[in-house]
C-alpha cells in the first residue's frame, strides 16, 4: 500500500490572522489582527502589511499601527481605494483571514523625536489619524505633556467616526480614562459637510479659532512650550510645515529631536 503524504496548507510569509473588521464608510474601515510575539514598536510607527497578488508575490504597503504598544493585538485604520492594488482586495478581509505583516516598525511620528514641552498637538487629515490613534492611547503621551490636542479634519462628518468613537472610548476607559480626563482635547472638523466645527486645520490655527473654541491660552503656537506632530496628504503636510516654522518651531527627527515632526499619510 502506498502512503499518501499530506501536503501542508501553504501559509503566507509573516502571516497574521485578522480578528475583527469594522467598516465606517465606502472609503474607510479598521481591522485588528494577531500581533507577532517578538514585535516591539513605539506608538506612532508604521509597518509594511499586505496580501499576495495574483502571481503569489507579496503586495505590501506602509500602514501606521493604530493600536498602542501595550495592546496584545494590532489595529489598522484603512482607506479603500476603488482601483488600488492593495486596498481593492484588503477591503474584503474578514475575521479568520490571513494578512502579511513585516515586523520592522519605523517612522518619525514618535515622542522621542520631540523635545520636552507642555502642549502636544496632533494634526491629521483623513487616515492620517492612524498614528495618533496609537499615541492617544499611550500613557507615555500624558506623562510627558500637560495637554494633548487632537485636531482631525475630513471632508465629511461620517469620515470622522473612527476618531470620535476612539476618543469617547478612551474617556470611558477604566485604566487610561483618568489619565486622559481634562488633558486630551479633541477638535474634529469638516470642510464639505455641515458639522459643529468647520474648516481646514490650517485655517482654524491661523484665525485662532481653535484656541478660542477650546479655551486655550494664547492664539498661536509657542516654540517654548508647544510641540506638534503632523500626518496627512502631501499638500497638507507642506502647508503645516510652513505654518509651524512661521511660529518658530523646527523639524525634529529620531536622531535630533526638535519641536515638530511630520509624516505622509499616503503617497500622492
Ligand atoms: C508612512 C505611511 C503610512 C501609511 N499609513 C496608512 C494607514 O495607516 N492607513 C491607510 O489607509 N493608508 C496608509 N498609507 C497609505 C498606504 O500605504 C497605501 O497607499 C494605501 O493602503 C492604498 O494602497 P493601494 O495599493 O490600494 O493604492 P496605492 O497605489 O498605494 O494608492 C493609490 C492612490 O490612492 C490614494 N491614497 C492611498 N492611500 C490613501 C490614504 N490613506 N488616504 C487617502 N488617499 C490615499 C493616493 O492618491 C494614491 O496615489 C500610508 C502610507 C505611508 C507612506
Ligand atoms: N473623501 C472623499 O469623499 C473622497 C471621495 C472620492 C475621492 N477622493 C479622493 O481621495 C483622495 C484623498 O481624499 P481624502 O478626503 O482622504 O484626503 P484630502 O483630499 O487630502 O482631504 C482630507 C481633508 O484635508 C483637507 N485638506 C486637504 N489639503 C489641505 C491643505 N493643504 N491644508 C489643510 N487642509 C487640507 C481637506 O479639505 P478640503 O475639503 O478643503 O480640500 C479635507 O478636509 C483625494 O485624491 C480625493 O480626491 C476622496
Image (tube, grey):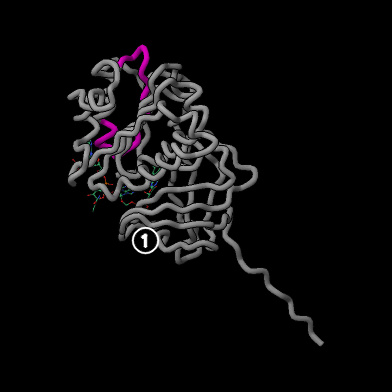
Q: Residues within 10 Å of mark 1 (few under 14, many from 20)?
A: few
Residue at 55% x, 37% y is 69
Q: Is residue 199 above or below residue 6?
A: above
Say which of 51 and 16 sits in front.
16
* Secondary structure found at label 1: helix
Residue 27 percent coordinates (x, y): 31, 55
Residue at 23% x, 45% y is 155
Asked whether mark 1 lies closer than 8 Å to ligand 1, one says yes
Residue 110 percent coordinates (x, y): 46, 29
Say which of 184 and 110 sits in front.
184
Say which of 184 and 38 sits in front.
184
Q: Which portion, as a residue range, is magenta?
A: 222-238
Residue at 53% x, 57% y is 19
Which residue corresponds to mark 1? 88
- Residue 132 left/right relative to 154: right
Residue 231 percent coordinates (x, y): 35, 35
Residue at 52% x, 30% y is 139
Rendered-image quadrant of the N terminus: bottom right
Rendered-image quadrant of the C terminus: top left
Amino acid at each position: 500500500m502506498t502512503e499518501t503524504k499530506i501536503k501542508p496548507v501553504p501559509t503566507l510569509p509573516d502571516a497574521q490572522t485578522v480578528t475583527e473588521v469594522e467598516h465606517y464608510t465606502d472609503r474607510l474601515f479598521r481591522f485588528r489582527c494577531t500581533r507577532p510575539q517578538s514585535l516591539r514598536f513605539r506608538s506612532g510607527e508604521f509597518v509594511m502589511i499586505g496580501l499576495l497578488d495574483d502571481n503569489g508575490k507579496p503586495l505590501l504597503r506602509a500602514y501606521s499601527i493604530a493600536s498602542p504598544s501595550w495592546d496584545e493585538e494590532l489595529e489598522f485604520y484603512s482607506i479603500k481605494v476603488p482601483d488600488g492594488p492593495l486596498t481593492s482586495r484588503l477591503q474584503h478581509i474578514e475575521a479568520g483571514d490571513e494578512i502579511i505583516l513585516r515586523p520592522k516598525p519605523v517612522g518619525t511620528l514618535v515622542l522621542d523625536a520631540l523635545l520636552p514641552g507642555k502642549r502636544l498637538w496632533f494634526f491629521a487629515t483623513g487616515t492620517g489619524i492612524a498614528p495618533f490613534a496609537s499615541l492617544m492611547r499611550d500613557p507615555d503621551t500624558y506623562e510627558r505633556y500637560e495637554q494633548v490636542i487632537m485636531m482631525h479634519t475630513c471632508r465629511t462628518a461620517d469620515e470622522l467616526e473612527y476618531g470620535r468613537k476612539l476618543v469617547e472610548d478612551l474617556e470611558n476607559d477604566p485604566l487610561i480614562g483618568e489619565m486622559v480626563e481634562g488633558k486630551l482635547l479633541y477638535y474634529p472638523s469638516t470642510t464639505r459637510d455641515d458639522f459643529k466645527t468647520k474648516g481646514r486645520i490650517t485655517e482654524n490655527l491661523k484665525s485662532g479659532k481653535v484656541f478660542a473654541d477650546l479655551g486655550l491660552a494664547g492664539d498661536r503656537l509657542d516654540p517654548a512650550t508647544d510641540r506638534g506632530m503632523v500626518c496627512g496628504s502631501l499638500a497638507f503636510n507642506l502647508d503645516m510645515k510652513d505654518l509651524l516654522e512661521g511660529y518658530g518651531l523646527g523639524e525634529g527627527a529620531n536622531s535630533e529631536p526638535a519641536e515638530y515632526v511630520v509624516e505622509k499619510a499616503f503617497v500622492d
